[in-house]
Amino acid sequence: MAFLFALLTALLWGGASIIEKLALARVAPVQAIVVRSLGISLIFFLVMLASRQIGSLRLVPWQTLLMVVTAGLMAGGIGQWTYYMALKHGRASMVVPVAASFPLVTFLLATILLRETVTVHKLFGVLLIVAGVLLVR
């Protein structure tokens, strides 16, 4: 099941990158992020209302809220802005693979901070990510 969701994510993100590249020819990255974020927020607010989960937000511990907000600022805020700046000024075929090399960063941080084990398979995967980015560039 996780693989199917990951595959769907790749298809959606891949298609969205092309639409975003076209849109960024007409607007500034910050404008695009605001519109994108408002749209996403509205949709998920309505989903929470429809599923009667809106009240459950008050039950989330403040430490968890802080972590999620921090991650949102990193990925959805500053990360999205740097991605849009790169996409606006660069070739999509170069920007997207480099930006999509985040599993390499995740692997390194998970190994260092979460003390996840390093295996031959993981190292081979990291090498394939780096090789893929270099080949597409």
Image (tube, helix red, strand yellow):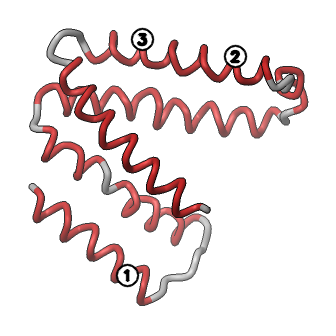
Q: Secondary structure at mark 1?
A: helix
Residue in view at x 70 percent, y 33 percent: 66
The three-letter amino acid code for the residue at tag 3 is Val
Residue pointed to by mark 1: 123
The quadrant of the image that shows the N terminus is bottom right
Looking at the image, is mark 2 or mark 3 earlier in the sequence?
A: 3
Horizontal arrangement in the rendering, residue 92 relative to residue 126 (left or right): left
The three-letter amino acid code for the residue at tag 2 is Leu
Q: Count all numbered tags in the image, as a single digit.
A: 3
Horizontal arrangement in the rendering, residue 84 relative to residue 119 (left or right): left
The three-letter amino acid code for the residue at tag 1 is Leu
Q: CA distance from mark 2 to mark 1?
A: 42 Å
Q: Secondary structure at mark 2?
A: helix
- Above or below residue 132? Residue 74 is above
Residue pointed to by mark 2: 46
Residue in view at x 69 percent, y 18 percent: 45
Residue in view at x 33 percent, y 10 percent: 31
Observer-side mark, 2 or 3, equals 2
Observer-side mark, 2 or 1, equals 2
Residue pointed to by mark 3: 35
- Above or below residue 79? Residue 1 is below
Observer-side mark, 3 or 1, equals 3
